[in-house]
Amino acid sequence: MEQLTIALAKGRLGEKALALLERCGVDGPALEEAGRKLGLQDRSGDTRFILVKPSDVPTYVERGVADIGIVGKDTLMEMSSPVYEMLDLGFGGCRLCIAGPQDALSKQEPSANLRVATKYPNVARAYYGARGVHIDIIKLNGSVELGPLVGLSDVILDIVESGRTLKENGMDVLEEVCQISARLIVNRVSLKTKGRRIKPLIEEMKKALEDTP
């Protein structure tokens, strides 16, 4: 049987993805003992797993290093990788939002650029561009919430789960950009050359999701 390579994000998303794959008959117990290993195989040798940063999953799938991957919709929106998005897996749910002090938007001068701190510059550019709003994008890789607190930005565009961090820093959700969840993506060539393995797995995943309470 031809080997299938699956790219999984390190952390909670990867753990949930593995649990779903195991329900679909993919043998992955070896991941529990992964330690610092970045590449593992199942017991049969039919499936190989690579463990990567969430933001790198689309790149590995796009380049054909991995045949399929599981990644958040926010990452797909930012990367715009030419891969097939096959399934909304439902878990890893959160919101991509514009947040800041309540008066952040009302204080902006009509002629001034809105300063937006974010890990998602491409998403921010597309979102505001579609509305004809000029923005000054400030790319940050961590602690995005700090932007408005220190005067670096007017608002932020970031993932929001409970909203607790925003509240603790005197901010609120001002606009919801979209809902986010984990997605199954497939390399375009692999879907043709390894379709005999990938398509049945997709059907099994659909059934497992339908059976989820």
Image: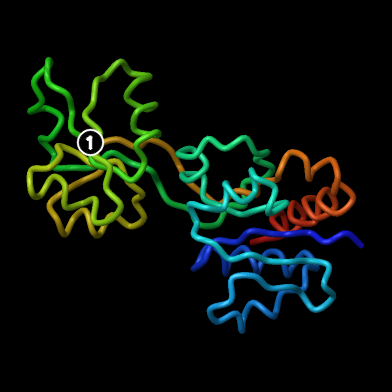
| Quadrant assignment, res 189 | top right
The location of residue 92, given as percent across then percent down, is 50, 57
Screen quadrant of the C terminus = bottom right
| Quadrant assignment, res 143 | bottom left
The residue lying at 86 percent from left, 54 percent from top is 197
For badge 1, the amino acid type reads Val
The location of residue 1, given as percent across then percent down, is 92, 62
Is residue 154 left or right of 188 when viewed as pictured? Answer: left
Q: Nearer the viewer, residue 213 or 116?
A: 116
Q: Is residue 98 above or below residue 109?
A: below
Q: Is residue 169 above or below residue 15?
A: above
The location of residue 31, given as percent across then percent down, is 64, 77
Is residue 80 left or right of 21 when viewed as pictured? Answer: left
Is residue 72 left or right of 85 when viewed as pictured? Answer: left
Residue hosting label 1 = 116
| Quadrant assignment, res 33 | bottom right
